Amino acid sequence: MATDADRMPVYSGRLAVFSWAFFDWAAQPFFTLITTFVFAPYFSSVLAATPAEGQSLWGYATAAAGLCIALLAPILGSVADATGRRKAWILVCSVPFVICCWAFWYAAPGAQNGVLIALIAFAVGTVAIEIATVFNNAMMPSLVPPARIGRLSGLGWALGYASGLTTLVIALGFFAASPETGKTLLGFTPVLGLDPTTLEGDRAVGPFSAIWYVVFLLPMLLFVPDAPKRSRFGEALRTGLNDLKTNLTHARANKNVFRFLIANMIYNDGLVALFAFGGIYAAGQLGWGSIQIGTFGIILTITGTLGLLLSGRLDDRFGAKLIIIFCLIVLMISGLGMISIDKTTILFVIETPPGEEGVLFGSLPEQMFIVLGAIIGAVAGPLQASCRSLLIRLAPPNQVTQYFGLLALSGKVTSFLAPLAVGLVTSLTSSQPAGMSVVLIFFGLGLMLLMTVKEKSAGR
């Protein structure tokens, strides 16, 4: 007869834990270099006919990817729990992801179907890496005890931030160069003979992200133990769908938590769109190239890290709900300020003199855009972190894990709506500021619903 000791779960050692966290390090360049700060602005300002058209097309691609993720992620997440095996699924998703990253190189200016190549590679690559992340996340409970899940998640998040900053510095310092000077941000000639006049460095971030992913995925594949196979795919799919239905039924019965999950779904959509289009918007409205946008990304990453370091103590002192409310208000004010800026204007109507020629961020609109962006970076991380702590205070103690699955679902299930709305409004108005203003509506609606949520104390 098995004893209690025999039934006790056996958790992994430090090598497996750190190897698991390196998945975030491996995947992050796709989001930092391609989705936000280097390739996306290149797409809108160089490949697309106009910046407004580029923002619109990128919005449609983001929405299509988000819809696929919304349909697949919750089902495959349940399948991951039921089958046990995760690493094989990650490998299956990794193959198209790496191919898509490499394909960005072929989206050259003037290339036949360059725009189509970029959009398909972006949409398919996004779906592949997000689904791979679902299976990677499903490995967490087997690596550490429940009391250390938060720290494990934080480790992966921190490595992701560090990877984004590291690869952005590498891309700006050695690949992407100014067409005017032919030099990178660090003053070097681009490596591998990359031609600055055709912005080959901007496209090189695709193959670079593919190589980075393959190299740093290996520790997870080699040193993280996979769970034993528990059931076949068909049986697991039926079980997963039934579990998902049961979890949603329980959530609807708890109206307070359900309102929070819906609020999170709405304002998280806005956050997805804000980061998806931030670089594109700067390229179109301010005429920034990869050097300026990449430097902007470095600043946001630094302020985001500082914001995360401070948010834990503030959360404990003032409560998670108040932190989320504060962050949403700051996002709306800063976002409104950003869409009021173009090359010569701030606050929609105030005309400003041009900046000093050859000086990075030499004009007042650019400087104001940098400050507002830094503020957004500082509150975006605390917003997401406080959502997790608020859920712990809202959910029944014996159902926290179940509700964390629903929190992840609420962050994905409609993530296509805000990008789609940005794309549609931009297309209808041919105006980037008009398109981006949609994001503020999502923040406002999420905030109003959050105000109806009743927070319990941390020491309940």
Image (spheres, grey):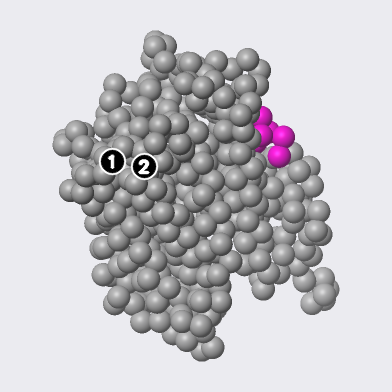
Q: Quadrant of residue 115?
A: top left
Instruction: Give the residue type at disc 2.
Output: Ser
User: What x and y, as percent, mark residue 74?
Assistant: 46, 52
Residue range (magenta): 211-216
Marks 1 & 2, CB-CB < 8 Å contact:
yes
Gap between marks 1 and 2 measured at Cα: 7 Å
Asked if 104 appears above or below 415 in the picture, the reply is above
Name the one closer to the observer, 353 or 284: 353
User: What x and y, as percent, mark residue 349?
Assistant: 17, 48
Residue 320 appears in the picture as rendered: yes
Instruction: Give the residue type at disc 1.
Output: Pro
Name the one closer to the observer, 438 or 74: 438
Label 2, on which residue?
Answer: 363
User: What x and y, as percent, mark residue 112?
Assistant: 39, 10
- Left or right: 173 with respect to 446? right
Q: Is residue 336 one of those drawn in magenta? A: no
The disc placed on residue 353 is 1
